[in-house]
Amino acid sequence: MKKLYGTGVALITPFTPSGDIDFPSLKKMLAHTAKGVDYYVVMGTTGESAVLSKEEKKQVLSFVLKNNKAGLPIVYGIGGNNTAAVIEEINHTDLRSVDAVLSVSPYYNKPSQEGIVRHFTAVADACPVPVILYNVPGRTASNLSADTTLRLANHSNIIGIKEASGNLEQCMKIAQEKPRDFMLISGDDMLTFTLYAIGGVGVISVLANALPLTFKKIKEHFAAGDLAKARKEQFKLLDINGPMYEEGNPVGVKQLLSDMGVCGATVRLPLAEASPRLREKIKVAYAAIKKG
């Protein structure tokens, strides 16, 4: 699955001020991000999938497929804390033009590691396309351990993990012991360079919605062996990354995109648009990036 190496953008879902899906802005987002990313991730957390209806999710996927002018691979998010419901959604989603499914580790229930293994095994057995695991303990309240990831890596239909635990020791163990073709993908924008360095294949990024060329440069400089330049691009994100999450994701990145004139900043409840304090912080951080 080398077509999923590099940068995947966890696409936002633009909304009109009234809260409807803003398809013209979504088309603009596809063109903007295609300048630097290698694939699209549709209906991830950043796409506010938790507050879109099943019909809206299908509409977004269909729109992305029809307006994918760059012909980039598509990863689609289907996950949850009810195994049977996840499988039902897989069975009722047309995945013929999708390259892989990104599936989050079950949240809220706080299952044991054995429960997580059984959940993902059932999902992977049922899914007609390859599955990428998604470990994000900050949202799920449970961690998909390195040992559990390595067990699941042996499943023929599980091809990688988006690792957003922030635990470098855990990532290193996965990198050291994983099957050769199993993809270790950063789920943390600020660890993109670091995971490349330990054997990761790329990142599924929030900030790539706004700054796709930065991630392209990190990848290209690293591949060329110019680590100083790759680090320099990574360090550009230091001041702007934190504000992206201070008031919930994708509040920060939508505000940044609004400042850039790409799309509006509207989010759906229970999220609220960026506060004046956060808007100013993002404005200052982005101005510093533009200065170089």
Image: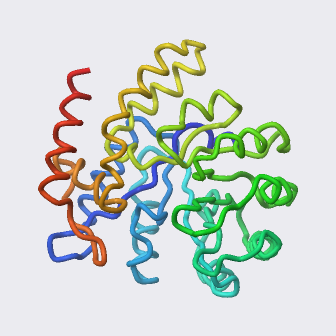
x and y, in percent, of residue 255 in the image: 22, 53
State the residue at coordinates (31%, 51%): 29
Apparent side of residue 48 relative to residue 163 in the rendered image (left or right): left
Judging depth in this view, the residue of 195 and 122 nearest the camera is 195
Front position in the image: 214 or 289: 289
Measured along the vertical axis of the image, is residue 248 above or below residue 287?
Answer: below
**What's the coloring here?**
rainbow
Q: Quadrant of the N terminus?
A: top right
Q: Residue at x 22, y 76 (%)?
A: 19
77 and 178: which is toward the camera: 178
Quarter containing the C terminus = top left
| Horizontal side, residue 21 vs residue 168: left or right | left
Count of picture labels: 0
Q: Quadrant of residue 46?
A: bottom left
Residue 265 in the image, given as x and y percentages of width and height: 20, 60
- The spot of residue 20 in percent (x, y) is 24, 76
Q: Picture coordinates of residue 178 (x, y %)? A: 83, 44
Query: Residue 145 is drawn in which quadrant?
Result: bottom right
Residue at image location 65% in from the left, 40% down from the top = 168
Picture layout, residue 90 above or below residue 40: below
- Is residue 149 placed above or below 236 in the rendered structure? below
Is 99 left, or right, of 183 in this rendering?
left
Q: Nearer the viewer, residue 222 or 36?
A: 222
Which residue: 39% across, 56% down? Answer: 67
Q: Residue 50: name its quadrant.
A: bottom left
